[in-house]
Amino acid sequence: MLTKEATPELIKEWQNIYYNHIDNLVPNRKTGCEIDEYFRGNYSFVSVNDKNAKETVIQNIINNESFKEKLSAGVKPKPMTYTIRDSNIFVGIDLISGYFYVEGSEEVYDDLFAYRGLDESDLKNFYLVAEYIRCKK
């Protein structure tokens, strides 16, 4: 999860990680349903059936080209929204695109990012590859 400004030094670090690992990576991205199933199987959660929460996930997808490109033409996101029991951690998972949104926990974000994996398009992005490698450790 990128929580600080992307400095030239940080970009260089991501590029180094990318070039050191890209030859050993293959597309392995999970579907949104698989990510949702993984989350529900590994976390104690409460479903959030709130229109505004679901709309937050939808807007994050449709207003970001790299997330939106994971949707087929004319297909709308289908978000599932949760909180982790006894916490203020919010999780939204789109069953269609595999996009997920985590608010309140870098650990949960990193776990879901590592589980989700990368597709062919993601493997061309040095930041996503570096983030995946970091989350897998």
Image: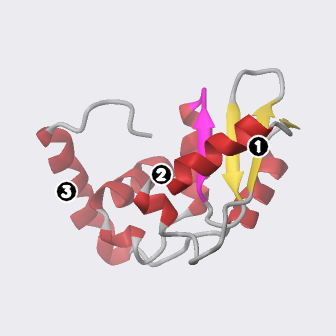
Q: Quadrant of residue 64?
A: bottom left
Among numbered discs 3 and 1, the one appearing first in the sequence: 3
Amino acid under disc 1? Thr
Instruction: Check the image and name the residue furthest to the left.
Output: 8
Q: Magenta span has 63?
A: no
- Position of the N terminus by quadrant: top left
Decide which of tag 2 and tag 1 comes sooner along the chain.
2
> What is the spatial separation of the Cα atoms under label 3 and label 1, in whole angstroms?
36 Å
Cα gap from disc 2 to disc 1, whole angstroms: 19 Å
Q: Is residue 2 above or below residue 67?
A: above
Return the disc, 3 or 2, that comes first in the chain's sequence.
Answer: 3
Instruction: Identify which residue is drawn at 69% across, 51% down.
Output: 93
Q: Which residue is mark 1?
A: 81
**How many residues crowd around disc 3 within 10 Å: few (fewer than 14), some, or many (20 or more)?**
few
Q: How many marks?
A: 3
Within 10 Å of the Cα at label 2, are there few (<14), some (14-19), or many (20+) other Cα atoms? few
Q: Is residue 109 left or right of residue 121?
A: right
Q: Is residue 53 left or right of residue 13?
A: right
Depth check: 133 or 59 in front?
59
Q: Are marks 2 and 1 in contact (CB under 8 Å)?
A: no
**Which residue bears the numbered disc 3?**
16
* Label 3 – label 2 distance at C-alpha: 30 Å
Secondary structure beneath label 1: strand
The quadrant in which residue 133 appears is: bottom left
Residue positioned 76% across, 56% down in the render: 36
Q: Is 101 covered by the magenta stretch? A: yes
Residue 77 appears left or right of 122: right
Residue at x 45% of width, y 78% of height: 26
Q: Amino acid at mark 2?
A: Asn
What residue span does the magenta drawing correspond to?
99-105
Q: On the image, numbered disc 2 is attached to which residue?
A: 63
